[in-house]
């Protein structure tokens, strides 16, 4: 049997990509806003280390090593999609995105760099966490039926290997955002089923009509009144 | 009595660190803000470090090797810990030197690893504003 392509619908950009880009957009807008509105000079200075001018340094889908001049920065990547039961029309998807807040800090005359780096990275990560977890972004700003929900999950902070010899005192805080949505499937034309029509004639038996053709069916005894 | 070879080893180590042609001029400031220039070996290079997230980070590592004798002779306060007065205490010392690009780099000692065998200390350096 020779098989040919059946899907005539072009498959383009996916919902998980739109969600990822939306997470980046929200963080970019809101971190810049926080830098503008905060009256706390320490927080403003920390936010400034994650910005280039007035723009937060956010890297989407970055896998190459972050260069020293690119730090401090925030990396957003999606890590997994888990499919649950659904139908041929749509599946329920749990997509997991990771937010990496990566930074370092130089020492000052009064404080070592590792202390400043850890405090700065954790402060900025917590601000990013609170932004995405806020009531304004229950559906990440999408229309009400675009995603089901988002869950902003645990934060964990760690120091990269060899960072004890690293002059910039690199620290990373990571958290995940889990987003639940329906993913539409490419639908096919339904399979044509054969129709069966049964006519019951109590006194003469059962006749089966298959696709309009009367099949031979065994005689059955008439039902006694 | 210290053996002849061990004494020679220590002398040779000091010569290599300070005056055999690999030395750099290091400006060192102790925690009492005394400053002196001593010779030592300074290195700085870039490397990728494992960020434990699947995303490596490119960073710099810098080290200085200095003899304790040179620091003491320069008048810097090295043995300052009252509980462990025999231990050289260098974390927090400021070190600066000129790199291969001709740029002056300033650091703070983040980790000091003295060798009581050779009399030298390897200092891991951190960025300093």
Image: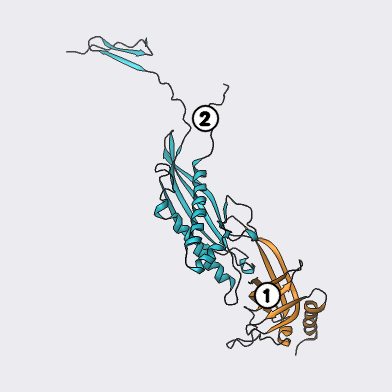
Chain colours: A cyan, B orange
Q: Is residue A137 visible?
A: yes
Q: Chain under label 1?
A: B
User: Comparing marks 1 and 2, which lies closer to the viewer?
Assistant: 2
Name the residue at the left extreme.
A225
Q: Residue furthest right?
A: B20
- In-image side of A133 versus A8 (left or right): left
Quarter containing the C terminus of chain B: bottom right
Instruction: Give how far across and how far down residue A217 sits, in percent.
Output: 34, 11
How many numbered marks are there? Answer: 2
Residue A121, given in percent of the width and then of the height, sits at 53, 64
User: Residue at image x 75%, y 88%?
Assistant: B2
Identify the secondary structure beneath mark 2.
Answer: loop
**Seen in the image, is A212 located left or right of residue A117?**
left
Instruction: Estimate the x, y position of residue A173 in percent, counting from the top left.
Output: 52, 61
Question: Which residue occupies 54% across, 57% down?
Answer: A100
Instruction: State the separation of the CA atoms marked 1 and 2.
Output: 63 Å
Q: Is residue A148 above or below residue A209?
A: below
Res. A48 image quadrant: bottom right
Query: Which element carries disc 1, helix, strand or loop?
Result: strand
Q: Which residue is mark 1?
A: B123
Quick one: B71 or A32, which is closer to the camera? A32
Does any portion of residue A155 appear in the rendered image?
A: no
Q: Is residue B66 above or below residue B44?
A: below
User: Split into 4 quadrants, where in the image is the N terminus of chain B?
Assistant: bottom right
Against B113, residue A204 (above or below) is above
Q: Image point 51% across, 40% down: which residue?
A: A14
Which disc number belongs to residue B51? none
Q: Nearer the viewer, residue A115 or A31?
A: A31
| A9 horizontally vs A151: left or right | right
Residue bearing mark 2 = A9
């Amino acid at each position: 049997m020779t098989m040919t392509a059946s899907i005539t619908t072009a498959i383009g950009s996916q919902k998980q990509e739109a969600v990822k880009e939306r997470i980046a957009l929200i963080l970019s807008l809101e971190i810049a806003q926080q830098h503008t509105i905060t009256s706390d000079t320490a927080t403003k200075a920390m936010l400034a280390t994650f910005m280039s001018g007035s723009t937060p340094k956010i890297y989407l889908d970055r896998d190459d090593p972050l260069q020293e001049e690119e730090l401090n920065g925030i990396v957003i990547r999606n890590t997994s999609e888990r499919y649950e039961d659904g139908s041929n029309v749509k599946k329920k998807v749990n997509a997991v995105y990771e937010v990496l807040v990566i930074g370092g800090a130089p020492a000052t005359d009064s404080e070592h760099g590792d202390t400043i780096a850890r405090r700065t990275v954790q402060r900025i990560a917590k601000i990013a966490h609170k932004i995405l977890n806020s009531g304004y972004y229950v559906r990440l700003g999408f229309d009400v039926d675009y995603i089901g929900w988002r869950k902003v999950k645990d934060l964990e902070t760690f120091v990269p290997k060899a960072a004890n010899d690293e002059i910039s005192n690199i620290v990373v805080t990571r958290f995940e955002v889990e987003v639940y949505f329906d993913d539409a499937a490419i639908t096919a034309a339904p399979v044509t089923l054969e129709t069966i029509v049964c006519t019951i004639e109590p006194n003469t038996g059962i006749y089966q009509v298959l696709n309009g053709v009367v099949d031979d069916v065994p005689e059955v005894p008439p039902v006694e009144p | 009595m210290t053996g002849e070879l061990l004494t020679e080893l220590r002398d040779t180590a000091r010569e290599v660190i300070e005056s055999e042609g690999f030395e750099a001029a290091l400006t060192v400031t102790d925690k009492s803000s005394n400053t002196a220039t001593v010779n030592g070996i300074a290195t700085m290079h870039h490397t990728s470090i494992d960020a434990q997230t699947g995303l490596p980070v490119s960073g710099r590592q810098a080290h200085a090797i200095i003899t304790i004798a040179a620091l003491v002779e320069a008048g810097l306060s090295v043995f300052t810990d009252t509980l462990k007065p025999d231990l050289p205490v260098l974390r927090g010392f400021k070190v600066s030197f000129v790199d291969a690009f001709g740029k002056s780099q300033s650091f703070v000692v983040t980790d000091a690893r003295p060798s009581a065998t050779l009399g030298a200390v390897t200092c891991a350096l951190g960025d300093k504003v």
